[in-house]
Amino acid sequence: MATIIGVYFIIISICVSIFQLALALKAPLGSYTLGGKHEGVLPKPLRIAALIQIGILWGFVYIVSSASNLIKNQPTFVSNVLIWFVVVFFFFGTIMNLSSSSKKERNLFGPINLITFVLLIVLVSI
C-alpha cells in the first residue's frame, strides 16, 4: 500500500507541477488558484511563486518517496519526521482549497488535496 501511495503522490505532483509551470508561463488559469482573485494571467510575483511552489512540491515528493520506500536507505528523520510536515501542509491545503471563494479551485483542487491528505494519513499509519 505504501508504494501505491508514493506512486499516486508522484503522479499528482507531476500534474500539479505542470499546472504551476503553466501559471508561470502566463497561462490564463488564475481563476483556479489563490481564491480566483486574479482572473486570467497571474502577476509576475505570483508567477515566480508558482515556480517556487514546484520546488517545494518536489521536496515533498522526495519525503513521500522515502516514507513509502520508493527511495531506500534514507535517514529516518526524512521518513518519520519530515513526512509529518507534508501531512500538516496538505491538511491546511485541503481546508484552504475546500473553502476557496473560487468554485473552480474548490472543485478541482479541493478533492485532490483531500484524497492526498487521507492517503498521507494512511501512509504514516502503516
Image (spheres, rainbow, N blue to C red):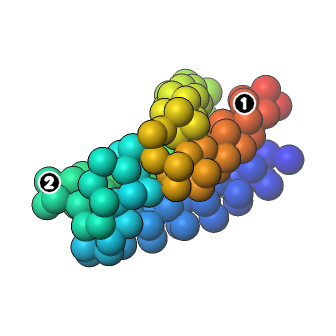
Q: Is residue 27 left or right of residue 94?
A: left
Q: Residue at x 38, y 66 (%)?
A: 29
Q: Residue at x 36, y 46 (%)?
A: 34
Q: Name the element at disc 2.
A: helix
Q: Can residue 77 be spotted in the picture?
A: no
Q: Is residue 29 left or right of residue 119?
A: left
Q: Can residue 38 be spotted in the picture?
A: yes
Q: Amino acid at mark 2?
A: Pro
Residue closer to the observer: 25 or 82: 25
Provide the residue designation for mark 1.
121
Query: Pointer 2 and pointer 1: residues touching (CB < 8 Å)?
Result: no
Q: Is residue 89 above or below residue 67?
A: above
Q: Residue at x 30, y 48 (%)?
A: 37
Label of residue 45 in the image = 2
Label of residue 89 in the image = none
Specify the quadrant of the image occupied by residue 35: top left
Q: Position of residue 42 (x, y in %)?
A: 23, 61
Residue closer to the observer: 62 or 100: 100
Q: Is residue 72 above or below residue 83?
A: below
